[in-house]
Amino acid sequence: MRVVITTVQVPFIRGGAEILAEGLRDAIRKEGHQAEIVAVPFKWYPPALILDHMLACRLFDLTESNGTPIDRVIGLKFPAYLIPHPNKVLWLVHQHRTAYELWDSKFGDLIHFPDGKLVRDAIRQADERFIPECKHVYTIACNVSKRLKAFCRIDSTPIYNPPSNAEKFYAADYQDYLYFPSRLTTIKRQDLVLAALAKTRHPVRVKFAGAPDHHSYYDLLLDSIKKLNLGDRVELQGMVSDADKLKSYANALAVVYPPSDEDYGYVTLEAMLAARPVITCTDSGGPLEFVEDGQTGFVTEPTPAALAEKFDQVWKNRDLAKKLGTKGRERYQSMKISWKNVVERLLS
Amino acid sequence: MKVNWFSPLPPAKTGIADYTARLLPVLSKHAEVILWTDQETWDPVLEEYATVKRLRSDSVPWRDVNAAAVTIYHIGNNRPFHGSIFEVSRKHPGIMVLHDVSLHIFVEHMFRLQWNNLDEYYCQMFEYYGDKGLRDAIMFSTIPNGVSFEHMSYQYPLTEFVLGNSTAAVVHTKSAFDLLQKKKKWPCTYIPLPYPGEEVETKFGKQKWTILPSQKCKLVIFGFIGYNRRLDAVLDTLGAFPRKDAFHLDMYGEIEDEHAVRNKIERLNLSKTVTFHGYASEADLNAALSQAHLAINLRYPTMGEASISQLKIWSHKLPSLVTPVGWYAHIPEGAAAFVRHDHEVEDIIRHLSAFLENPDSFRKMGEKGFEVLRIQHSPELYATTLLDFARKHASAGVERVLTDYLVDRASAELKSFADESVTDASIINVAKSIHSITAKIDF
């Protein structure tokens, strides 16, 4: 089978969606098919540019390539999943979120523009019209399916996929730090973790790994570290190698992952693979599909005080961290998450 | 439902501000209304019914604007009252309530006085009306008395330009509705102008009207009395009417050429028959109308707009003489007496004679007018119809705005390709793709 995966590329930004696309491509190839990623460049501001991208996507022709038919298109992200194809399936990473649940949230951007509502409505209209073109509608997580149903009244089936290098995760000694690997960006809420650190009773330390999406947020974090006097308790590692990431997971006391309404969140699964408990929040979305409060981690209110309490709890009780982390790994294994399963469903 | 309402507000001296003030108590029963204004002051009573927000077209809090489900703009021909509203409407699509059908003067003033860009005015005139439109526009804006403002308004209403970025249009007259329907470009509705139809005390009440020989029949004209109010014809008729002593005409408001009118009154020996009172407060005018027998509300030419003054006349159960053109042509039979613009003297004489013969038939005319007001111009009906229409077209109407944007965008790109490389097939493909994105879905 010749398969094209359609997604978007924001140059110089790399995160879970890029890893997912590459993982899918590799998994399809592993099953003996041909697979390519077609990534459409995407810029979402000013809002009218989104309309341009939508039109461009509708004008692309992926029915064949160099005279040979393309048998299946798998759409991942807006607006790349608008590209027409008679055998298209959707494996939705997420819709354009600021046109939906983030519209009037503090993360909303469209709402600040005079034509924001117009563009929002165009996006919603396009989703309602073109997603049903797909032969099957899958999503990467229950949280994404829930939003799709709530906003567009479209039913879908979630299919979980493993994080990249899933087989390489390991567990080692529990050392004195919490680990928070993620892009540094407002929606991941590193600032909330810093505010929580300032409220702990114990000298809890946190290692942050990941590059900033935008320098302004990085500056804000540096400023907070300084103001809250956290210089000796925080480490900003920036981009790290895979080996360093695996090691950081393996030695962490626990993993902190409190994003706002995450779609899926590899961090949760990676922590489980490394037998680390996950501390997340009640509004974190995807992680809540895996983290059971008091069983495989902690689910707290998204406030500095509530998070600080859990940080202290793990910090002073390594046995508890070990117990929750082990249960997390067992839970991951019981879920039988595999690329083979993903490929079977998407190509069926 | 949260509604943005961009309108002049009292104490601004415009009928549209009064319209908003009259409608607001009813409107606020059905929606959360946010009033947007660039005025520095407004009647604090408005804040009993709505939140008032200050508007500056160069720094609009779009987050607040976008928080409403529906945005409604009110546009009329007066640039100081509507200029900043129009500027916002060009950036943020919404539903436009047209208080004037022809908006040429407004548009010309926007280009000349607000944007200092007459060249663009000429471009728009050429785009909408071709060579002749362009020629007349140049004459109109550069040669004093070169082309009359009436000519420009009638021939080149520029309504489409004003509606350019709107998702739907609301008008107050059937003729305006028919005109816009023909364009097939905007969802459009016609809702008769609202006016409260509460029982008012009139001097004569519901009793049968009889006029004693010693009694004068009170005629009344009010408002801005310009050329099109046909005062010349009224005075000529009165001057020649054998039984003119049976009438007294009271005029309230502003006369366009007061000096000429006073001369005419003197020349026709009507000094005892006609009294000009000048500006009257709302209370004084209401008192005068409740004492009157017959209102004269002629207009020719007219832009066709609905008449608040006629609604005011009906609210006092006053019979009236009107010119059957524009909105007035659709007044239900028996609710007013018609004066044909090309037979004015003849018709006025006929109606005044009829009044003296059978005044009670005119009382019934006033009653009928009041019924029309109560049924067709109910603020409650207006508010619910407007909000239903707005709700329906708040999202669906964006299809045209989106189409316009994408067509402009695609054609700008296609223009940059070599002519021969742009085939019909590729244009059709682009058109189909645009249509697939913008074609209407009802949410």
Image (spheres, rainbow, N blue to C red):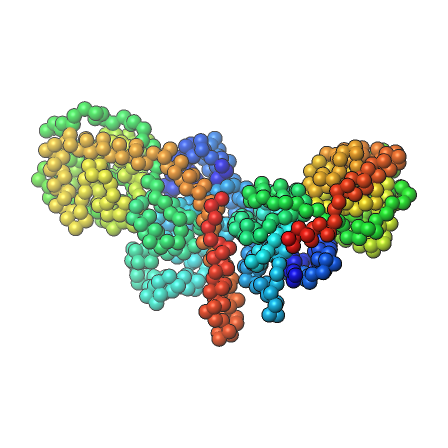
Q: Is residue B126 above or below residue B282?
A: below
From the viewer's perspective, tell me whether residue A199 is left or right of residue B403: right
Q: Is residue B31 above or below residue B153?
A: above
Q: Residue B419: image x %, image y %?
A: 48, 74
Q: Image point 86% across, 47% down: which residue?
A: A170
Q: Residue A51: image x %, image y %?
A: 55, 56
Question: Which residue is more in the foreground, B239 or B15?
Answer: B15
From the viewer's perspective, tell me whether residue B318 is left or right of residue B169: left
Q: Residue B320: image x %, image y %?
A: 21, 37
Specify the farthest residue to the left. Answer: B242
Q: Image point 45% across, 49% down: which residue?
A: B397
Is residue A76 at all visible to an observer of this figure? no
| Image quadrant where residue A227 sits | top right
| Image quadrant where residue A330 sits | top right
| Image quadrant where residue B368 sits | top left
Is residue B430 at all visible to an observer of this figure? yes
From the viewer's perspective, tell me whether residue A225 is left or right of residue A44: right
Question: Which residue is more in the foreground, B354 or B64?
Answer: B64
- Quarter of the figure that contains the N terminus of chain A: bottom right
Q: Residue B373: image x %, image y %?
A: 29, 34
Question: Which residue is more in the foreground, B268 or B202?
Answer: B202
Q: Image point 34% across, 34% down: which residue?
A: B378
Q: Image point 50% across, 69% down: which residue?
A: B415
